[in-house]
């Protein structure tokens, strides 16, 4: 079961860690290699068992997950930007107050 996280409650270091985790998850969806048959692929389903699938079937399965991860990463990056802007404004206000 997926854990739900309210990114607005996270601090900047936590957002950075979440962004890095999402980067790693997206990177793990790709495996470099060379295909002799670009229409069919073998998918490892565990314990030494493989299933032959068409590349199109696999793309249809992977694309929604990849889009979801990308949207999550964008949301995290936007929240990081907002937090940085808030910290910058706070620092400027504190500097002005001390002057």
Image: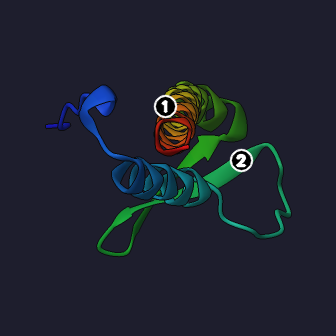
**Picture coordinates of residue 50 (x, y %)?**
45, 62
Of all residues shown, which one is farthest toward the front?
99
Crowding at dot 2, Cα within 10 Å, few <14 / some 14-19 / many 20+, comes out as some
Q: Quadrant of residue 42?
A: bottom right
Secondary structure of the residue carrying tag 2 is strand
Looking at the rendered structure, the secondary structure element under dot 1 is helix
| Residue position for label 1 | 86
Residue nearer the viewer, 12 or 30: 12
Q: Nearer the viewer, mark 2 or mark 1?
A: 1
Q: Is residue 95 left or right of residue 34?
A: left
In this rendering, the answer to whether 76 lies above or below 98 is: above
The percent position of residue 94, horizontal first and vertical second, equals 46, 40
Q: Residues within 10 Å of mark 1 (few under 14, many from 20)?
A: few
Give the mark, 2 or 1, whose residue is nearer the N terminus. Answer: 2
Looking at the rendered structure, the number of numbered marks drawn on it comes to: 2
Q: Nearer the viewer, residue 53 or 63?
A: 63
Pick out the residue farthest to the bottom.
Answer: 48
What residue is drawn where x is 60% and y is 58%?
27
Is the N terminus in the top left, top right, bottom left or bottom right quadrant? top left
Left or right: where 22 falls relative to 52: left
Residue under the point 48% across and 30% down: 79
Residue 4 on image: x %, y %: 20, 31
Tag 2–tag 1 contact (CB < 8 Å):
no
Q: Is residue 34 above or below residue 8?
A: below
Q: CA distance from mark 2 to mark 1?
A: 50 Å
Q: Nearer the viewer, residue 37 or 85?
A: 85
Nearest the eye: 1 or 4? 4
In which quadrant of the rendered image does the C terminus lie? top right
Circle 2 residue? 40
Q: Going 39% across and 57% down the picture, which residue do you hit?
A: 13
At 83% from the left and 68% from the top, the residue drawn is 34
């Amino acid at each position: 079961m997926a854990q739900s996280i309210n990114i607005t409650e996270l601090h900047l270091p936590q957002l950075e860690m979440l962004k890095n985790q999402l980067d790693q998850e997206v990177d793990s969806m790709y495996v470099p290699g060379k295909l002799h048959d670009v229409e069919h692929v073998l998918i490892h389903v565990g314990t030494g068992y493989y299933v032959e699938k068409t590349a199109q079937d696999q793309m249809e399965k992977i694309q929604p997950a990849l889009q979801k991860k990308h949207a999550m990463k964008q949301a995290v990056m936007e929240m990081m930007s907002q937090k940085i802007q808030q910290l910058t404004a706070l620092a400027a206000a504190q500097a002005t107050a001390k002057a």
